[in-house]
Structure formats: structure tokens, C-alpha cells
Image (spheres, grey):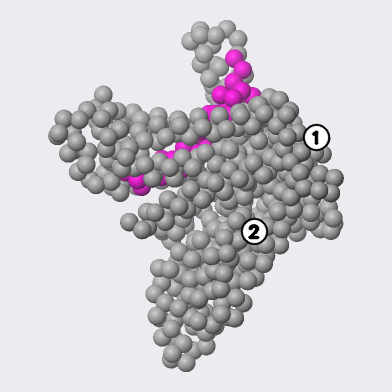
Amino acid sequence: MFQNRAEALALALPAAVFAAIVFLAPVVILLAEGFRNADSWSLVAYTNFFSDPLNRTVFLRTFRLGLIVTAVSAVIGYAAAFAIVNLTPRNKGQMIGLVVLPLMISSVARTYAWIVILGRTGIVNQALQLVGLSDEPIRFLFTETAVFIGLLQLFLPLMILSLISALENMPKDAIPAARVLGANWFQVFFKVILPLTKEGLVIGGTLVFTGSLTAYITPAILGGSKVLMLETLLYQRVTVANDFVAASVIAFILIVMSFAANLLLKRLATARNKR
Amino acid sequence: MTPRVFSPLVLFLVIGFLIGPFFIIVAASLSGGETLAFPPQGFSLQWVAKVFTVESFRESFAISMLLAIGGTAAALVLGVPASYALSRYKLPFGETIRTIVSLPIIVPGIIVGLALLRYIVVPFGMNITLTLFLAHTALVLPYAVRVVSASLNNLRSDIEEAAVLLGSSRAGAFFRVVMPNIRSGILAAFILGFVTSFNQVPVSLFLSGPGVRTLPIDMLSYMEITYDPSVAALSALLAFMSIGIVFLAERFLGFSRYV
């Protein structure tokens, strides 16, 4: 540990001042704008925002999709993480590589693939017509289902990776012990695995939930203006209506959610370090 | 069903779901047909070739490259000293500084882009390219600080104290003793920053001007107008680029230790 305070500040301040000016100040001013009305502080922008049925629909849809994506990725995540943890070390490394791989690909590219798959002449429609389940193309694009699938594909790796590390930290003989003592797989999961990997589940869940909540590309490409989410609504409010007040309200909601999730993560991380 | 049967099936389905779309993009981009389709109609490299002839793709690729390389380099110039101060000094307001520097990772990018447009570009008439550069620098800064800090924390601090005791200046100790030891950490931070910046959409969404937009934004607007496979071809090329970079990084640096 060096003690020289002036030297320390000289090293750290440029980065902090840069982030404060380029980043913090403009964002704070933008958020403040939503609480201003005719030169005084007020919540009018917020009551106006929530009195519009479209805004309420979008707000609720964003939360609903976020929750569903999180829940489904937790179920799939446990199955996948459990399978990966039980592989031989060599195969395990390769599988983790395959899970990480999509995270390195641009989300525009990843989302674009779903147009090819779910479009009118896409694979799913061709298959349905081939089997005879449907005579004419079914519309999958610009539905909540399409947005759900896109988000799930985007964020599932984060859940799997969190659960893999949680499962690896579990005592090795907990599951065999429970099995020997007569627990079925259902009981093993709810009485042994779930309580012991709770933190990993919360970490993965927070990442998936905030990721889905603040997603832009997926709802933009797969939802369009039919299935707006908070970020696409923000973009539309600004570009179509020049409505910066509504944009500020949406920004505030998104930031509060992100911060709440981040605090939760930080608290869990410190709780884990203490033990 | 026992895990023995169940596990391979689950893995097959999950990995298929995660990786499958990527193969479909690759296949669709090799199509001989005029519109986006799968299975591809015939085989040709025409769409891959077309990517290189689209003027706007070339321009936005150059801008994205400039932002990713320049922005990440700038973030490291700011971030390496800050990480050093945070890990080696008794820094006044250390936690506050750490929080401010890592904020750009928490606040959704679209808000940053909008705020910069409204309070910096419009009132001060700031150049869009410069604003994009500042935004991408701020965006990469948290990653730079996190990765370089991790790498500094793994390095024993008594070696540089020894160098100082033996008469080296503090700066000399940093450049001759610390830097060579955290070089691969810095390189890992650079690669992570590059990939993050290059693939970044929301920050740049509001920050586009005449002839100035980043590649992902250009792809988004191109696919709104045209339904040909060239965006698929471009997506596939970019994916191969990212995978190649990360693969090399993992091979030579053990990248995953830092991320």
C-alpha cells in the first residue's frame, strides 16, 4: 500500500472526471427533466405517462416478458448446467465454450437469425406446412412469442454459466447421499440442489431479468411497433413524437430497475465473501 | 428418466438452440436466391461478395473499427492508472471513484446515447464522431478497470515496493516492473473492450449523423429496407471475426481467466 494521496488522486481522477462529465452529468440532467414541470418539481410527467393505456401495456409487457424469460431460463438452465457439470473435465470445457460462444457474437446477428427461422417463408412455417399442420403461413414475427424466443436465446447463456459455478461449489456427495437415503429426483432437486445453489440462481436471474428489461435489439427486430417494450417505446417516443419527457420517465424506470438488480448482486457477493 | 439418458438430450437441445441460429445465418448467406430463405436456394458467394461493395457498410465498418480500437485504447489510458490507484494506494473516496467509473455498465446504453445527444451534441454542436468516441470510451472504461484491477490484484505488490526501495522512481517501477507483469491482463481488457464496443447498439442508436453511423446501426437500418441475404452474410462474417479474436485470445492468453 502506498500512502501518497496526491499521487493516488492524480492517477484515479482523470478516469472519474471523464466518466462524470461524459456520462454521469448528461444522464442526471435527463432524469431530472422528467421531474420538472413549469419551473417547479412535479410528478406530472409520471402520472401522465401511466394514464396512457399504451404506456401501461408496454410497461406491464416488459415486466411480464422479463419474468417469463427469467423463469424459463432458470428451468432450462438447471437442466443444462446439471448435465454439463457431470461431464468429464475435457468435455465440460468444450461445452462451456459452446455456451460462451454466442455471447461473443453481435446480438444483431443473433437476433437476425430468427427472422430466417420464424419468417413467413421461414423454417418453422415450411415444416408446419410440410407436415400438414397448417395450410397457410402462420405469423410468428412481430409477436410476443418471437420476442420471448429471441430474448431467451440471448440471455440463457448467462443463466447456465451462473448455475454451473453454483453447482460446482456444491458439496460433491450431497446428491448421492440424498439418493442413498431414499430421496427421489424431485426431492433431490427441491430439498438439496435448489437450497444449495440459491445464490447462483439469483445472480443468473438478475442478469437475465435486467438484460431482458433493457433489451433494445430483440424487441426492435422481432417485435417491431406491434410488440413494443420499454426501450423501443423510448426510441419511438423520441424519434416519432420528440417527447423527451416520456423518454426521461422511461429512462428513470429502467435505471431504477438496473440499480436495484445491481445492489442485490453486490449484496449477495459480499454475503458470499464473508462466509 | 434417469440423468444418463436425459442429460445428453438436454445438452443437444440447448446447444442446438444457442448455436443453431448461427449456422442458419451462415447457410442463408451462401444462398443463390434473391431473398432471405432457408434452406438456401442453390449455392453462391454473391451475397458475401456484395457485403464488400455496399458503400455504407464500408464506411460504417471503418467507423466501428475506429471507435472500437480508439475508444478501447482511450479507456485503457484512463483505466490503467485508475486501477493502479485503486489497488495500490490508500485512495480518498476510493469506493465513490470505483462506482462512478463502473456506472456505464449499469445504466442502459440507450439512455446514455439520448442524454449525450440532447445535452452535448445539440447545445454545444459537438461533432457526432467525437461524441461516439467519448461514449464508447466511457462504455469500455468499466471493463478496462475491472479486468486490469483483477490482474493487478493477482500480482504481489512487494515486488514494486522492492524496486522503489532499491532506488527506482515510482513511475519507473510501474513501467519496468508492473507493466510487463500485467501485459496479458491489459491485452485481455483490450479484446473484451473491442468486442463490446464493436457489437454495441443502444449507445449509438441516437448518435448518428449524415454519413456517420456504426456498423450494427447501419445493419439495422439496412434490414428495414432490404430483404436480401447480405445482412446475413455480414452477420456471419462479423461472427467469424469475433470468434476468431476470442479463440486466439483464449489460446495465447487464457482469456477466460480475466473475464
Q: Which quadrant would the N terminus of chain A be assigned to in this image?
A: bottom left
Q: Amino acid at mark 2?
A: Ala
Q: Is residue B60 above or below residue B163?
A: above
- Residue B204 is at least partly visible in this image: no
Chain containing the residue with disc 2: B
Q: Is residue A145 magenta?
A: yes
Disc 2 is placed on an element classified as helix
Q: Principal SS element in the magenta part?
A: helix
Q: Within 10 angstroms of label 1, few (less than 14), some, or many (20 or more) residues?
A: few
Q: Within 10 angstroms of label 2, few (less than 14), some, or many (20 or more) residues?
A: many
Q: Quadrant of residue B51?
A: top right
Q: Is residue B234 above or below residue A263?
A: above
B132 horizontally vs B142: left or right:
right
CB within 8 Å, label 2 to label 1: no
Q: Amino acid at mark 1?
A: Val
For the point 57% across and 32% down, which residue is it? Answer: A63
Give percent across and percent down for residue A125. 56, 17
For the point 52% across and 79% down, which residue is it? Answer: B175
Q: Which residues are magenta?
A: A138-167
Give percent across and percent down for residue A32. 74, 50
Disc 1 is placed on an element classified as helix
Which residue is disc 1 drawn over?
A240
Chain containing the residue with disc 1: A
